[in-house]
Amino acid sequence: MMMPDQAQDLDSILRRELLPGEHLLWSGRPQPGKLNAAFAIWFFAIPWTAFALFWEAMAFLPWVASTHTPSGIQWSFGIIFPLFGLPFIGVGLGMLWMPFGARRKAAQTIYGLTDRRLIRISAGRKRESASVMLGQMGPIDVSADADGCGTLRVQTGTVRDSDGDRVTERFEVLAVPDVARLESLLLERRAAVQL
């Protein structure tokens, strides 16, 4: 939950980001509780982490088993295999943490629509800012829940990835209340800019 001081800090950071003569038309903060889709990674992360922990337990078996394993094998496999499993456990724990990290970042993020651009600012340990000018925006798609909270995605261009495939770049406004109002204001401003 965001404290009132944090909300005021985000509002003041957004206002400081405005260019001279730029007017703020809309601002909104994502609702972290609406980012439940981020937990979908757990369908992969839980089995991954469970297998990595199983591997690690089996790798320690030569150390705890009461077998007559030769000491050279015990030392080589008993050290190499557990070390090999550690990065996989780290990756699994990282994947399990990702949804909580996304919610934490959302609590430190604010979006703004001005008469010139759409802005996203995250003010965590370091301040990150991104914006897209109204004239650079392509097609828009919106998804909303019954309560009006939703996500707006704006295509900003296409690039070629390392394989040479075309990848569409998007600017996302995630889990904001009354996303339909943002879409309406954005379409009005884009139409005004194109005249």
Image (tube, rainbow, N blue to C red):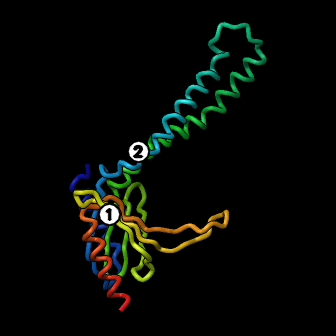
Who's the residue at 55% across and 40% down the image? 91
Q: Which residue is mark 2?
A: 39
Q: Is residue 67 above or below residue 21?
A: above
Q: Is residue 14 above or below residue 90?
A: below
> Horizontal and vertical percent for residue 158?
55, 72
First in residue order: circle 2 vs circle 1: 2
Who's the residue at 43% across and 45% down the image? 40
| Three-letter code for the amino acid on which mark 1 is drawn | Ile
The image quadrant that residue 105 belongs to is: bottom left
Residue most extreme to the bottom: 195
Q: Which residue is mark 1?
A: 110
Q: Is residue 61 left or right of residue 6?
A: right
Measured Cα–Cα span from mark 2 to mark 1: 22 Å
> Horizontal and vertical percent for residue 70?
77, 12
- 83 or 99: nearer the viewer: 99
- 24 or 10: nearer the viewer: 24
